[in-house]
Every structure is written in C-alpha cells, then in structure tokens.
Amino acid sequence: MGSDSFINDVIWGLSDPQKHLPSKYFYDEKGSRIFQEIMQMEEYYLPKCEMEILNKQSQKIAMEINHDEFDIIELGAGDGTKTLIFLEAVMNIGKKITYIPMDISEEILKVNRQHILERLPDLSVEVLPGDYFSTIRAIESRPKPRLVMFMGSNIGNFPGEKAIEFIRFVNDYLNPGDYFLMGVDLKKNPHVIRAAYNDKKGITKKFNLNLLERINRELQGDFNLKAFEHYGVYNPLDGAALSFLVSMEEQDVHIADHTFHFDQYETIHTEVSQKYSLKDLDQLAIKTGFSWDRHFTDRMGFYSLSLFRK
Ligand code: AVI
C-alpha cells in the first residue's frame, strides 16, 4: 500500500505546472539518517532551542496543567530523549501520569519505552505504533484528562491552512480542560532562518536530493542527481521557509511509464517550514478552538513551546 501511494503522489506532484513532492517522503532509512545529521548542524538551531526550554522550563510548563492525574499523548514521539526531561519534571511535582507515545516506527517506540523506563521505572508507558492520524482515536476511550504533545516544529511542515486543519483535528479529540503542547519555530532574523536551510556542508542539499534518489531506488526513476541543485529560501512576508530542487538543464525524467519534462531552471517544491510569531500563535489557538494559550521561549526568543488549553 505504501509504495502505491508513493508512486501516485509522485506522479500527481510532478504533473502539476508547478512541480511539487510531499516532504513526508524525505524520511526513508537514508533520509532519517541525514535528518539526524541536520539536527547536529551548527546552523540548525531548532533542537538546541527546544532542549533549552525543556531543560529550563519543564517544571513551569507542568505547573500550568490543572490536573493531578492525566495522560500524556505524544504524536510522532521518536526515541523520547527530549520528552524524558518533561516527564520527569511532571512527576517531580507529584502529578500522576501515563505516557502514551505514538509513532509510525514500532522499532523507535521500543527504544523510547526502554529509554524512559531506565530513568523513570515507576512511570506507566503504553506505546502505540502506527500513523497518528489513526492511533490518536485510541484516546477517546480513555477517561482521564489529557495533554497531547507535538514537538520538534513538525507543525511547520504543514503548508498554509493544513496546519489549522491538523490542530483542529487534534482539538476534536480533546475535552474542555485538556491541553495541547506544541514545539514551534518562531519568526526571527531572516538570515538565521535562511542559514538553517542552507548549511555550509551541504547536508540539507543531500537531504533534499535524497528524495529524488528514493524515487530512483523505489520507483525505478532515472533522475540524474547531478543535474539538480538544492535551493532554500525564506520569505519574511509570510514566514515560510521553502525548499526547492532546481533542474539545472532541460531534461526528461522517466518514472514508471511516465515521462516528465523539465525546462532549464524549472523547480520542484519539496518542503515548507513555516515560522510563526507569538501573535500568530495566539491567533492559531483561537482559530483552532482553544480558549487559552501560553508560550515558553528560549533565551534568544527563537523557538516556543506553546501550551493551548481547550
Ligand atoms: C522535521 N522538520 C521540522 C524539519 C524543518 O525544519 O522543517 C525538516 C527539515 N528540513 C530541512 N531541514 C530540516
């Protein structure tokens, strides 16, 4: 089923007058490895900022949650390294919690569980593997109040109105008095944002090009990777960092039974990484059905952990 929708999405995206490919396909095994490299990059400030907020303000965030006992559901939890800091802070102020990490990868959830329990052996952890658009349904039958977490600035990869749709979708699974905590990259000096998506070592370029490589590998495409350049741009007018692959020559590319023509300098749009201001986030909270919000930022004001209450 997976590769079926991959081929359909690729054919659909490359048939559009402005060619595009969905960024979710970056993350095959190789792409996930390159993403780990991105997370270590000097220019890519996002993980460092999120970590700083978690280290310094987890207790403050935890104190805002008006429940003594609740479930913590994390969407796209990964290995839980960062969340551990938050969970520990919540437990340290005497709250009773169950942690429910959701992730597409069953493997990573095993690592997550082991990791968390080594440090917090008394915590109840119930992993839920699968696509969180489906696994989130499981929380409906749980009677306790809940906090849903969505970290890592992943909300930024939902283009335009899709971010609103997604948060509304999460909101539908919450009851009044439940919370949503989201990691968000903030609008800032445009040079800083631009550099984060145009690193000197070319790791982001490798990440972007891997999408074409993946099409070659899995869909028997014949992209000539040397004929494409990475182009990352940040537009301060709307706060969108956009990534493109630029065809440096006129060429035809074949995938399955299809031929796609590229003019010289024609682009494929591969990703949006939306940046928000704190005012944008207040608006977002209102638009998505929340009645209260608070922002916890790092000392540079680059990044926010934003807490919304329904
Ligand atoms: C996963 N996501 C939040 C990253 C971002 O910043 O949009 C993906 C990424 N793309 C290029 N560098 C990092």
Image (cartoon, rainbow, N blue to C red):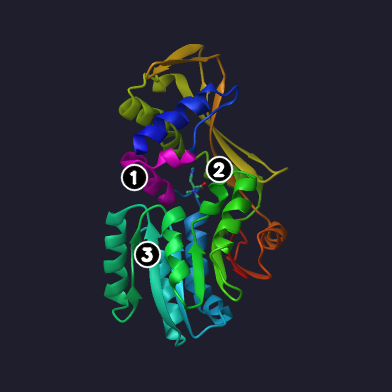
Of mark 2 and mark 3, the one earlier in the sequence is: 3
Tell me the element at label 2: helix
Magenta span: predominant SS is helix
Q: Nearer the viewer, mark 2 or mark 3?
A: 3
Residue segment shown in magenta = 23-40
Q: Is residue 120 left or right of residue 137?
A: left
Q: Which mark is residue 81?
A: 3
Of mark 1 and mark 3, the one earlier in the sequence is: 1
Q: Which residue is mark 2?
A: 195
**Could you tell me the amino acid type at mark 3?**
Thr
| Rendering quarter of residue 111 | bottom left
| Rendering quarter of residue 280 | bottom right
Bin the neighbour count of mark 2 within 10 Å (Cα to Cα): few under 14, some 14-19, many 20 and up. Answer: some
- Picture residue at 52% right of the left edge, 16% below the top: 262
Q: Dividing the image into 4 quarters, which one contains the C terminus? A: bottom right
Q: Which residue is mark 1?
A: 33
Bin the neighbour count of mark 1 within 10 Å (Cα to Cα): few under 14, some 14-19, many 20 and up. Answer: few
